[in-house]
Amino acid sequence: MGAEATPILPAVGRHIEAEAPYTFALVGDCRGNMEVFEAILSRIKADRVQFLVLTGDIVKNCTERDYQWVLHELDEKLGDLRLFPLPGNHDILTHSEDPVERYRLYTSAFGPRRYWFSCANTLFVVFDGATETCARDEIEWLDETLGTLRDRFPVCFVCMHVPPRDPRPGLNHALAEGADELVAVLEKHHVTAVFASHIHSYAEDRSGSVPVFISGGGGAELDWPFDGYHYLLCTVEPYGSYNLRRVGVDDMVNSDYPEYVLRVRVPTHVALPAGMGFLVLGLVLWLRRL
């Protein structure tokens, strides 16, 4: 990736030293309105959480310049907040037959597409369902990971982008393949809860006996029932219970959109002269007010 892109790598396979109760945040589908996402990041940092899980659809389009833009924004706004991302369908080249090429931009920016980490009394397993399917090797990886680690922790959360099913009547914005196999593994290992996004709203569901919380209100255009932009705060208690709170943020115009267009959508040979032109114009207007 270009010189502007600095990978933001999660602490894969590591234990975060903390004591319960502790709180972490979740945000999904932040693509498209960086103003909302920046407001959410500011609120989350003020909440003094242990870390943020970013449940996919981070970039608007899967291009190198889109990734450079998002990394530039995160570098400005993330500060010391620890980030655990995972890929969504917008973050990968979904039509590529080559799995390495499909994830190349995502992994060069954010690291592994699937992994685990732990914090205090909780195991987190980050599962890759960005293709909107659960291939056999994905299910086998999840089963093996949970089989090795699950018994060590009283709490276990699985985080993914596309939910096993869409709880909204008549809609099916969910896994197209492999949902039954996925749910069987979740139940087999007594997963505490699943966190997903993909649906740009908030919903609570169950896949078999496992609670599923869907939160896609991080900035992308909202879906029915249009309940507003938001993020989640989850507090894990010492004895394995957890409390979940949805935190709403105001709708707002994306004031970064002109900069996004200039840096990402306009060809490079046009963007640089245009940017210099805007800079000169701004300087002239400022001098005229002196």
Image (cartoon, rainbow, N blue to C red):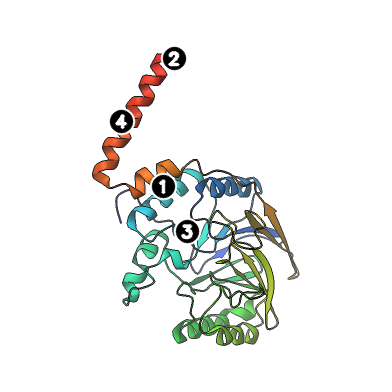
Left or right relative to 114: residue 281: left
Q: Quadrant of residue 201?
A: bottom right
Q: Quadrant of residue 51?
A: bottom right
* Camera-side residue of 42 and 33: 33
Specify few, some or many for label 4: CA neighbours under 10 Å numbering under 14, 14-19, or 20 or more: few
- State the residue position of label 3: 58
x and y percent of residue 190 in the render? 67, 82
Label 3 residue SS = loop
Q: Earlier in the sequence, mark 1 or mark 4?
A: 1
Q: Which mark is residue 12?
A: none
What amino acid type is highlighted by mark number 4? Gly
Viewport quadrant of the C terminus: top left
What amino acid type is highlighted by mark number 1? His
Label 4 residue SS = helix
What amino acid type is highlighted by mark number 3? Ile
- State the residue position of label 4: 277
Q: Are marks 1 and 4 in contact (CB under 8 Å)?
A: no
- Choose mark 3 or mark 1, whichever is in front: 3
Q: Which mark is residue 72?
A: 1
* Camera-side residue of 56 and 286: 286
Q: Which mark is residue 289?
A: 2
What amino acid type is highlighted by mark number 2? Arg
Which residue sits at x=52%, y=57%?
83
x and y percent of residue 218 in the render? 57, 55
Q: Quadrant of residue 271?
A: top left
Q: Earlier in the sequence, mark 3 or mark 1?
A: 3
Q: Are marks 2 and 1 in contact (CB under 8 Å)?
A: no
x and y percent of residue 79 in the render? 51, 46
Left or right relative to 96: residue 72: right
- Choose mark 2 or mark 1, whichever is in front: 2
Which residue sits at x=34%, y=66%?
104
Specify few, some or many for label 1: CA neighbours under 10 Å numbering under 14, 14-19, or 20 or more: some
